[in-house]
Amino acid sequence: MPEESLLGERYPELGRQLMSVGLTDLLVAVPSFNNEATIERTVQAIEESYQRNFVRDRVVILNLDAGSTDRTTEIVLNMNGRRSGGQRGIMSLRTVHCVTTQYAKVPSQSEALQLILTSADLLEAKA
């Protein structure tokens, strides 16, 4: 299925969010399903990693949620744009975007992978 069709027809909101982000250097995908207890620490670890190792890169954290009934996606969205100094006070020189979408009513690894690859292609992510 071409990426325009996948994002345009099945996930139009995800497509709009990704288009508003623009091109990126790094795309970090975090599939989730009812991970309210751990998602904040997971995203923090990702942020600390890019702040330490990829200071000049444009980063997008993509949360693909499989229909969580808890606050998983809300927590990710509330972290959007947060700029902390991390453990060593190092901050990214670029804006980091957090994008989240519900991709299925039931967890599906193949659909999640398809969305990750389509998103990476659309954003022309280097990694």
Image (spheres, rainbow, N blue to C red):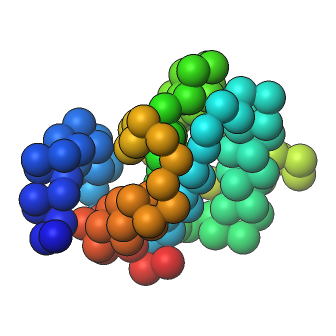
Residue at 43% from the left image edge and 79% from the top image edge: 126
Q: Quadrant of residue 56?
A: bottom right
Q: Position of residue 48 (x, y in %)?
A: 76, 53
Residue 11 appears in the rendering: yes
Q: Position of residue 25 (x, y in %)?
A: 44, 71
Q: Position of residue 8 (x, y in %)?
A: 12, 49
* Mark count: 0
For the residue pair 87 and 66, the one nearer the viewer reads as 66
For the residue pair 96 and 121, the one nearer the viewer reads as 121
Residue at 28% from the left image edge and 43% from the top image edge: 14
Q: Position of residue 42 (x, y in %)?
A: 75, 46
Residue 96 appears in the rendering: no
For this orientation, the residue located farthest to the front is 106
Residue at 63% from the left image edge and 20% from the top image edge: 70
For this orientation, the residue located farthest to the bottom is 126
In the figure, is residue 72 to the left or right of 20? right
25 to 76, vertically: above or below = below
For the residue pair 90 and 125, the one nearer the viewer reads as 125
Q: Quadrant of residue 85?
A: top right
For this orientation, the residue located farthest to the right is 87
Picture quarter with the N terminus: bottom left
50 to 68, vertically: above or below = below
Residue at 25% from the left image edge and 66% from the top image edge: 122
